[in-house]
Every structure is written in structure tokens, then in C-alpha cells.
Image (cartoon, grey):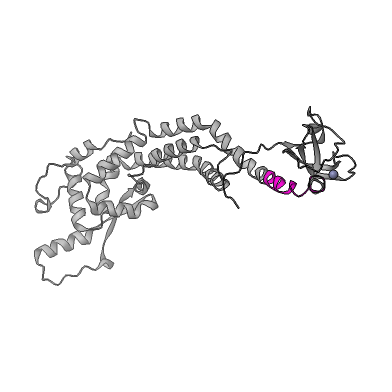
């Protein structure tokens, strides 16, 4: 069987017998010629049975078709008696029409999305718009990835699905470090059971690290919308119709999701939130690097680190780093 795109069949569903009987070319008592109709023009499923429109046929039915017969007249015939009057050739015709009828609501819903396309495009653009939309978030995430240690990036991606993370400072570890510095062979073992973990706060907005910077969702959405609008929704194969229906159903949810992610971005890129990242880092080396970044900010409240723990002054002080990130509205 040929698996090409079916020819376009227009589906008309009649709600009452009066609707099709009122059509200008409709006739009752049409003499069957044995020729198949040139077209099925519509169908009906009625609550009460109607009489077949062919002469001499007294059958009644509730599910039938309005057909265009050879002489240009239209009449109605039932699911079964169409075969009696028009022969076996009516069968593929009926089958094709039935399929088009089944697909009709799905194609119709795609056409409705087309009429809604401008609103969707505006919503996509609004998501990306400055000053603190998707464009801002994408820029900040790219800069952040360059400025912050790769080890921290790896941790952030790992905890990202949780959305936020409570962070602690382990005091004993600092103590042990001093001991270790005093004498590495003193036999001091790092026993985490004795760690005093002091809560430092909650790092927020972590979900933004689930975003794919190479396939930025807002651009992705607009590209998909453009692809969708190029389609001929009446003739594309039905599996594509179903695929695009799923796409349209998920669209608003995806837009909502990205709106939330942009909101998360505003929570993440705040100075107080960034200052907590040192406690999220898993490795001591990264922690030191980040704590220095925070100390780099001249703050009266920030505890002065022991001089020997402070790494040599680098050009990328926190102040500079923060300058390169565009701050969130506070
Ligand atoms: Zn009949």
C-alpha cells in the first residue's frame, strides 16, 4: 500500500438531517446507478435514524454520509447501504473519509494554534527581553561559567534539580586544618562524626544550572514555533499531527517553566546568594578559592581570614567578578 500523504479531504459533520437536506444540491429518492459517488462531502451521527436518500431503499440509519453522485446531486446514505448502492468501490472512499474525520479535530486544534501564533511569539520575546529576562540570564550564566571554578560548576549542576541547598560551615575541619598545618604527622584523623556544622544559609535559584546554554530554551521555542508555522496542517501525515499536538499542549507549560527559571536566576545572581557558594563547594581547594573571592569584598562584618590562608592577591577580586555579572534587582 502506498504510504504517501492522503489527498486533502474536507470534513463536514452535520448535526441534524435538516442541515444536509437544506443544501442546494440535496435530493431525495436519487436513483442509484451503481457508480460510486464522486465524493463524500460530509457525515452525520444522529440521535434518531434517518431514511436513506436513494430511491427504493427503505433502510434507516443514524450514522451515514452525504455523497455527491454522478449527476451533481447530493444525497445521503448509510454506513452499510452505501456499499449496497455504490458497490465495493465505496469502501475505500468511506475508509479514507472516516480516517480524515478521526484526524479532523487534531488538525483543527493545530489550525487554532496558528491563529494564536502572534500571542505566543510575543510571550517568547517577552521572556527574553531586558533588563532581567532570558537574555540577561544567558549572559550571566556564560560569564559565571568562565569566572567560577569548574569544580563548583560540577557541584552546581549536581544539586541544580533540588532548586536550593542549605549550606554549612564545618568548624572542626578548619580546626583540623590548623592542626594539620601545625604537624602533618600528628596522627589527627578527620572524623566527620565530630564536625561542628554551623548553618550558613540557603543557596537559592539553583535550577538555572539545569539549563542548556548551547540550546537556550527560549531560542529553541521560537525556532520550533517557526517550524510549526511553515507546516500545512491539513496535509501533513497524522503521526506528525499528533507530535505537533503534543508540542502545542506542552508549549504553555514550557513557557511557564522558563519564566520560573528566569525568576530563579534573579534569586541566584544576588551578592548574598553568591557569597554562600563557598560553603557549597565540595573540595577544600575550591572552598578556599571561593572564600577568598568573598573576602575580596571589603566588608566590615566579614571575618578577616588568617593571613597565611589568604592566597596572593589576584586581579579577579569578587568586586570585579560581580561587576562582570549583571546584578539582579534587589
Ligand atoms: Zn440505502
Quadrant assignment, res 300? top left
**Where in the figure is residue 297, as x and y percent of width and height?**
18, 41
Depth check: give the residue in front, 17 or 150. Answer: 17
Instruction: Give the answer, above or below, for where 127 lies relative to 98.
Output: above
Q: On the picture, is 184 further left or further right than 107?
A: left
Q: Main secondary structure of the magenta part?
A: helix
Instruction: Give the answer, above or below, for where 97 lies relative to 169.
Output: above
As for residue 202 lying within the magenta part, the answer is no
What is the total number of numbered labels drawn onto the structure image?
0
**Where in the figure is residue 2, as x and y percent of width and height?**
59, 50
Quadrant assignment, res 283? bottom left
**Where in the figure is residue 310, as x and y percent of width and height?**
12, 50
Q: Residue at x 67, y 43 (%)?
A: 101
As for residue 88 lying within the magenta part, the answer is yes
What's drawn in magenta, residue-wise? Answer: 83-98
Kindly give the residue lying farthest to the bottom in the view shown. 187
Ligand 1 picture quarter: top right
Depth check: give the residue in front, 11 or 265. Answer: 11
Q: Residue at x 49, y 38 (%)?
A: 228
Q: Residue at x 26, y 66 (%)?
A: 192
Q: On the picture, is 153 further left or further right than 123?
A: left
Depth check: give the residue in front, 112 or 59. Answer: 59
Q: Quadrant of the C terminus?
A: top left
Depth check: give the residue in front, 128 or 265. Answer: 128
Amino acid at each position: 500500500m502506498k504510504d504517501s500523504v492522503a489527498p486533502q479531504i474536507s470534513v463536514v459533520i452535520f448535526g441534524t438531517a435538516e442541515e444536509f437536506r437544506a443544501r442546494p444540491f440535496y435530493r431525495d429518492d436519487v436513483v442509484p446507478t451503481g457508480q460510486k459517488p464522486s465524493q463524500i462531502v460530509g457525515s452525520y451521527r444522529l440521535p434518531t435514524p434517518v431514511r436513506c436518500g436513494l430511491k427504493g431503499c427503505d433502510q434507516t440509519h443514524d450514522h451515514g454520509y452525504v455523497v455527491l453522485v454522478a449527476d451533481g446531486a447530493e444525497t445521503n446514505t448509510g454506513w452499510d447501504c452505501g456499499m449496497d448502492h455504490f458497490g465495493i468501490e465505496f469502501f475505500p472512499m468511506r475508509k479514507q473519509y472516516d480516517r480524515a474525520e478521526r484526524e479532523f479535530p487534531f488538525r483543527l486544534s493545530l489550525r487554532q494554534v496558528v491563529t494564536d501564533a502572534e500571542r505566543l511569539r510575543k510571550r517568547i520575546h517577552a521572556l527574553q527581553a531586558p533588563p532581567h529576562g532570558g537574555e540577561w540570564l544567558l549572559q550571566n550564566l556564560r560569564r559565571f561559567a568562565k569566572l567560577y571554578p569548574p569544580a563548583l560548576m560540577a557541584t552546581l549542576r549536581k544539586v541544580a534539580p533540588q532548586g536550593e541547598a542549605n549550606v554549612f560551615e564545618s568548624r572542626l575541619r578548619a580546626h583540623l586544618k590548623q592542626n594539620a598545618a601545625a604537624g602533618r604527622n600528628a596522627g589527627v584523623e578527620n572524623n566527620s562524626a565530630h564536625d561542628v556544622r554551623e548553618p550558613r544559609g540557603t543557596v537559592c535559584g539553583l535550577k538555572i544550572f539545569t539549563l542548556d546554554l548551547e540550546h537556550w530554551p527560549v531560542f529553541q521555542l521560537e525556532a520550533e514555533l517557526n517550524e510549526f508555522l511553515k507546516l500545512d496542517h491539513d496535509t501533513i501525515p497524522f503521526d506528525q499531527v499528533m507530535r505537533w499536538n503534543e508540542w502545542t499542549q506542552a508549549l504553555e507549560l514550557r513557557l511557564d517553566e522558563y519564566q520560573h527559571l528566569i525568576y530563579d536566576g534573579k534569586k541566584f545572581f544576588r551578592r548574598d546568594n553568591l557569597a554562600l557558594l563557598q560553603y557549597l563547594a565540595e573540595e577544600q581547594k575550591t572552598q578556599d578559592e571561593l572564600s577568598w573571592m568573598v573576602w575580596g569584598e571589603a566588608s566590615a562584618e566579614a571575618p578577616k581570614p588568617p593571613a597565611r590562608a589568604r592566597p596572593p592577591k589576584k586581579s579577579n577580586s569578587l568586586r570585579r567578578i560581580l561587576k562582570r555579572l549583571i546584578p539582579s534587582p534587589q
